Image: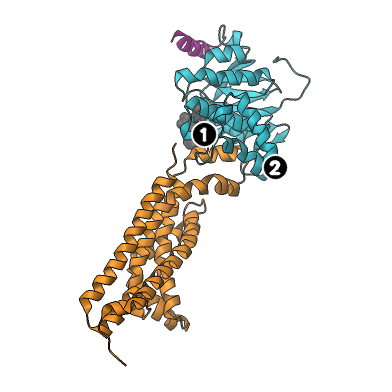
Chain colours: A cyan, B orange
Amino acid sequence: MSTEPAARPPILRIEKLVKKFSERLILDQVDLAVQPGEVVVLLGPSGTGKSTLLRCINGLEEIQGGQVFFENRPVVANTKNVIDVRKHIGMIFQSFNLYPHLTALGNVMLAPMKVLKESRAEVEARARELFRKVRLEHRADAYPGQLSGGEQQRVAIARALAMNPSLLLFDEPTSALDPETVGDVLDVMEDLAREGRTMIVVTHEIGFARHVGDRIVFMDEGRIVEQGPPEVIIDAPVEERTRKFFGSILRE
Amino acid sequence: MQFDDNVAHYWRFFLSGTMTTLWISWLALMLGGAIGAIIAHMRLSRVGWLRAVAIVYTEFFRSIPPLMLFFFCYYGISYALGLNLNPFTSATLALTLTASSLMAEVVRAGIESVGRGQWLAAISAGMTPLQVFRYVIWPQALRVCLPPATGVYISTLKDSSVASVIGYIELTRSGLLIRETTGSSFDVFLIIATIYFVINYGLSLCGGALERRFRIVH
Ligand SMILES: Nc1ncnc2c1ncn2[C@@H]1O[C@H](COP(=O)(O)OP(=O)(O)O)[C@@H](O)[C@H]1O
Ligand SMILES: [Mg+2]
């Protein structure tokens, strides 16, 4: 997908977003638009506000300035409308957050049945399909506690997909994983990108950012410092801060 | 009336006392669980005055000795409100007040044991607050609450023996009456103590079993 002005309207539009915790400024005038089918990779030092930005997108945080529009609807925390918005936005967390009292299949089926009120048969068929997609068809009946981190994260991805979301938010999906299972999760995410899913991915996996990202957004101290295609932002950034960040990461 | 001083001949009386004790404690535990659950949610609410009411309720009723509560619920209420509560109603009320304050803390601990990530995941999936509680928080909290709830049942069972002071014929009161008839204190108290022990030890084993059964592997 390209980052040139698209004919289609953006699926997500963030304008002059300001987020404070008590008096501390966390996000400072953030502007961001995401086109359908685009994979945006959000990079930046920790404590910069990346997770907070994702939480503002699905209305989990009250904001102190600016606006967020998802599919042209305003996203405002603590309103009825925001619950509806969340049905269309899938979120994947660093710590998986699977429901430990339900099987993997139960995890995937819960929201479609209770939130979308779809029939069990319909949901189960779709869920089984998703387990194939994340390559875990043999683990559907296991409880989260019996799964490895990489397996849990793939179940979490299936759980998000079961809602047929039009936007997927990933918050450091591989940061809590053992190195040997990171690849399985990244492979699944790459498949999703190839299918044309719209995704915003916070990660420190530069390889993934480079090969899968359509656009890199580099953030520091609550601001977007610069953004553009991976080969520009990672290899030839303009800003000093961006250069320093990739300099230290790539040297590792 | 004929006197029979063989304690064993009063087994029906012991049995009905035991059943009464089990029943009134169970009733108080159920009512206390329901009220305690409401108090626990008030305590966790964002509304300041709801939290304040919950804290006062919990701290007050778990600090008052059961004897005071029985007197209050039996004599106090009839005196103050002109309501003539029978011993059963008064005893149930008194036991429920204590049990609910204990259950409030059990339920609160259960809900607080469910991590923030569970809320985030469920809310992000588009669930309403009630759905989050019903499908994600309560099922996990319940598993955490059950073992300590058997502890509350044990404590309520023991408190119920105090109901004998307002003339309610539960196990202890039955024993006291049998003692008056037979005159053999030692035998009677030994039997009663044994019954309490067997029940409470059994409950305690149940609590342990529940804990193993419902342990969630994270
Ligand atoms: N609930 C909160 N209350 C107060 N401060 C918070 C809260 N959540 C995050 N912060 C602060 O906001 C800043 C940005 O956090 P975060 O969005 O998690 O950064 P990142 O994901 O980029 O590491 C950090 O300094 C963090 O301490
Ligand atoms: Mg973060």
Q: Can you say which quadrant of the picture contains the N terminus of chain A?
A: top right
Residue with the most extreme right position = A7
In percent of the image, x 30 and y 82: which residue is there? B177
What subunit carries mark 2? A
The location of residue B148, given as percent across then percent down, is: 38, 54
What subunit carries mark 1? A
Residue corresponding to mark 2: A119
Which of the pair A137/A220 is nearer the observer? A137
Q: Amino acid at mark 1?
A: Ala
Look at the numbered disc 1 and say if its residue's Cβ is closer than 8 Å to ligand 2.
no
Horizontal side of B135 relative to B22 (left or right) equals right
Disc 2 to disc 1, how far (Cα)?
22 Å
The location of residue A69, given as percent across then percent down, is: 69, 32
Query: Of helix, strand and loop, which one carries label 2?
Result: loop
Decide whether the magenta segment is chiefly helix, strand or loop: helix
In the rendered image, the vertical position of residue A214 relative to residue A111, given as above or below: above
Q: Amino acid at mark 2?
A: Ser
Q: Which mark is residue A79?
A: none
Residue corresponding to mark 1: A142
Give the mark, 2 or 1, whose residue is nearer the N terminus.
2
Decide whether residue B210 is among the magenta residues: no
The location of residue B213, given as percent across then percent down, is: 42, 46
In the rendered image, the vertical position of residue A170 relative to residue A114, given as above or below: above
Q: Can you say which quadrant of the picture contains the C terminus of chain A?
A: top left
Can residue B57 be seen here? The reply is no
Horizontal side of B186 relative to B192 (left or right) equals left
Q: Residues within 10 Å of mark 1 (few under 14, many from 20)?
A: some
Q: Quadrant of residue A227?
A: top right
